[in-house]
Amino acid sequence: MTPFDYQRAADAAGAVAAGVRGGAKYLGGGTNLVDLMRETIERPDCLVDVSCLSGGIDETPDGGLQIGAGVTNAAVAADRRVRERYPLLAQAILSGASAQIRNMATVGGNILQRTRCGYFYDDAARCNKRRPGDGCDAVDGFNRNHAILGASPACVATHPSDMCVALAALDAMVTVEGPAGPRQVPLIGLHRLPGDTPQIETVLEPGALITAVTLPPNGISARSRYRKVRDRSSYAFALVSVAAGLEMEGDTVKDVRLALGGVAHKPWRALAAEAALRGRLLTDAALQGAAEAELSPARGLRDNVFKIDLARRVIVDSLSSLAQAREIVR
Amino acid sequence: MSLVQDTLQAVMKKAIALAPDGFIPGGHPDPLIHHKHGLIGAPVSRIDGPLKVSGKAAFAAEFPVDGMAYAALKYSSIPRGRIAELDTRAAEAAPGVVLVMTHKNAPRLQPMPPFMSQPKAAGGDDVPVMQDDQVHWNGQPVALVLAETQEQADHARSLIRVAYEAGHGVTALAEAKANGSEPGLFQGEPLKLDLNDAEDKLAAAPHKVDVRYTTPRHSHNPIELHAATVYWEGDALRVHDATQAVDHAAWTLAQVFGLREEQVHVTSPYVGGGFGSKTLWQHQILAAAASRLAGRPVRIMLSREGVYRIVGGRTITEQRVAIGAQDDGTFDALIHTGTVAMTPHNNMPEPFILPARSAYASRSFLLDVETVKLNMVANTFMRAPGESVGTFGLECAVDELAHAMNIDPIELRIRNEPEKDPTTGLPFSSRLIVEAWRRGAERFGWSKRGAPGARREGEWLVGLGCATATYPYYRMPGGAARITLTRDGRATISISAHEMGMGTSTAQTQVAAERLGLTMEQVTFAYGDNTLPGVVLAGGSQQTAAIGAAVSAAQRQLFETLLQLAGNDSPLAGLKPDEVGGSDGGLGKLDEPQIFESYASILQRAQRESVTAEAEAPPPLELQHWSMHSHGAMFCEVRVSTVTGEVRVNRFLGVFDCGRIINAKTARSQFRGGIVMGLGLALMEETQFDERSGRIMNPSLAEYHVPVHLDVPEIDAIWLDEPDPHTPMGARGVGEIGITGVGAAVANAVFNATGKRVRDLPITLDKLL
């Protein structure tokens, strides 16, 4: 670990004033950042501790919830309102990491966690995130956990969060405090695809601080499900995960939300699949067609071609299970 | 002591005769095996358990020493070549740095004699340790930083800049194979056997399977990281090590540093898991060299990544198994051949053919392990080396043949049960696998097994599978022990053996208490110190027998001395050692227990505070007279998702034939632990070795998957408890057999569930979509 300064922010404005300086990093629970610092992958000059800021979960006027960026993952998953109104989110959080990590990790830190690509983690390897222009050893290396959607020759890494997949499906908005004042960014627009600049992972400007995540009210809570597929039963990153929600009118899809994890450089909102289903009769053929619509641009690498088929299977199964659950409810 | 143990002690009055001084044909079994109601077999909790759970058991990296400096290692990032430039200036200038050691300033050292090259050799390889600019594998230590704190050492390490001149490293298996193979040599003998033209018999057989299996690299992941606290006292080297071989480590360190063996003192009271990995690797040597250079005590504890980089694991195997059978299922030919990877600097040809040498009768055999050379960290022993991966190929192939012939796989195995060892002709010392199969089949509900793919529960396909577990009995030469009996009626057993968490000290305390007629509280088991008698490696599941034989020999010596001391005024006057036994804190005549004198009384009359006896174990001649193996019948039920291909293990049963079980609790933990490790082998463990760079890409427990709690169902482990008449205590080891057969049992269950045969471990979900 490289020596660094540490300071605790008193409020968001103070944090941003400190965080906007070059070499500063915000510290939440530290469950990812500190690991990366130990490996000297991250070498901030200064850590601005924001874990003490914005620690509440509050009702919004329109019936949604606003979750402070400093709330721990464990606290979000345990919140009664979250469990009742956004079970998808609680399920997603609880499928990630371990209880110990969830007790430390914050909402803001979870959103901004970095990829688990082994070549990113190993300074002996080439990585365009660590050294832009260096090349990517993952493209032709071990890439079982890597992207099938939206990747580029420069980077095939995935965003590892489970929580963000649920947030993407729930149309979450992210409140950002920046040097130019606060603004709102849709979660699905926060992370970038790698393109030629995989080192730039979000649309946040330097010094910007995530202060809250807002969940709008929705009609899918009763029929939603997070399914995570991985190589062991717990404490493993998703090969493919699916956050799915369904709102029906008779046999017709009134609304559908679908987001995928483990497949791209960002939490992947499956807008093409949703568009293919919305307003349609929910048939197996429609589900297969929707999955196909989403996955036709998918490209596999040496170790992860199977994820295309796996994603299709889990999309179809998740939505058809939700459709059947609807009938049982009715 | 628990109520159970008190009760056991209270009823334990009958003295036990001395164990025989050898196990040869015509000899008598250990009288202890007829002793039914004492401590032997009781589920005694670990005597060191309270120390461990309260944090009072000191492990290798926990010994405080004044003036200690902390070490961090910098690893190479190329597989072969030379160090062209090594810039350590920034590191040397960093806060707290004591020194930076590289090949330019390291003391001159001899290479480690590698394991099995000499009787007490413990080296993982014989690569020169930081002596020149040559790089032999990706991850080799190229510099060591010593600093006042671990954090300072770690930081300074990150400031070292190394430039390499790349050489040609062989890192792809295909290239290594193209370079040619050599027969593997194991314990001095080629891993080859060609009996009665197996290929011809296979070709002519009416039924056959001929299939290929692969197993990947596995990295060692004991919970305790490899560590040592070392310092010099003049020319003597003191090492608090985490090792399963204190004597081997001391002898090998002496060779490296040009010392006499007596100048090296290695202790290792507690080890947080060894599994074959806790031997001598570069870190202990580098720490000792740096300690000499700095004139300060040094603590080195590898990071988890460090363990992956410089401690070897299990190598890759490619296996062919072919079986030819008659219509009745009896084998005409059993062929098990293949290739394993090694390095140019070690000799550990993963001996996967060992199970096939004695598991089944066959009219012909062809067994062969070929080795190829790679630039990688030297592969080494890992729990049941050979058997763990060898039973995967062999026991899957038997299942494949059973399916092809429409014979129940248990029935097929029983039809091929040999009467004597099929390749050596030796009689079996004890072999009850058929009984284990029958008992296990009944207990597991084997008769409910259906056709492949027939049983579905929701989205899950459910299947049953089975496989034979097998592991040999070993007892290595070199065992010796000392017993010191004091006038207060306490005994200390001293032997240079090891406790790595498996319960050795507990089980051996039980045995010694039973033999001497003492309570467990009256017995101290001293171990983990190379200055104690004997050379007893914790490996090959041999410690129980090796310690047992050595302690028995010392006990014979002790009884002779005690009877001499007792003299003519004792009720025991005139009795010979074989006529007495230990009971109730003294010696009693075997057939007339009222003829008795307590140890305290004997010593008091002789005006002695204590009496000491030391003896060597008899040579392990039993291994020359019998084929000696433990077995297990392994049963597994899995479910496989039809949506995702995920495999979940519903339940597992192992029925073990391991001779007499000494401690029901620690033995059950060993069986279960082995099975859990086997589930990892079956379903998830795989070291990602990048064939372009020779770099291990998943050196962490986040990315290298071992089973978590949710992956492990309830595991039922039972045993037949039939003593082996030709071993000390009637026992055979239990440390390794649990992992054997598990990979095949899972794979066979997956086949029964899905109809899909996965022949390449691990069985990940993509192979089942």
Image (cartoon, grey):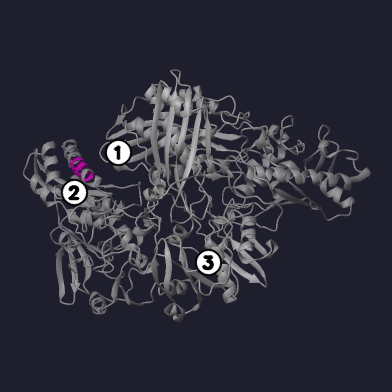
Residue placed farthest to the left in the image?
Answer: A279
Q: Is residue A20 visible?
A: yes
Q: Which residue position is annotated with label 2?
A: A221
Residue B284 image-quadrant placement: bottom right
Q: Residues within 10 Å of mark 1 (few under 14, many from 20)?
A: many
Amino acid type indicated by mark 3: Ile
Q: Residue at x 57, y 35 (%)?
A: B630
Amino acid type indicated by mark 2: Ser
Instruction: State whether residue B707 is above or below residue A9.
Output: above
Q: Residue B596 location in percent, x, y?
A: 84, 40
Disc 1 vs disc 2: which is toward the camera? 1
Q: Between residue B248 and residue B62, name the one nearer to us.
A: B248
Q: Residue A314 location in percent, x, y?
A: 22, 43
Q: Earlier in the sequence, mark 1 or mark 3?
A: 3
Q: Residue B19 location in percent, x, y?
A: 74, 38
Q: Between residue B449 and residue B180, name the one nearer to us.
A: B180
Q: Which residues are magenta?
A: A310-318
What chain is tagged by disc 3? B
Residue placed farthest to the right in the image?
Answer: B568
Magenta stretch secondary structure, dominant: helix
Q: Between residue A181 and residue B405, name the one nearer to us.
A: B405
In the rendering, which numbered label is found on residue B290?
none
Q: Which residue position is annotated with label 3?
A: B300
In the rendering, which numbered label is found on residue B768?
1
In the rendered structure, the answer to whether residue B80 lies left or right of residue A317 reads: right
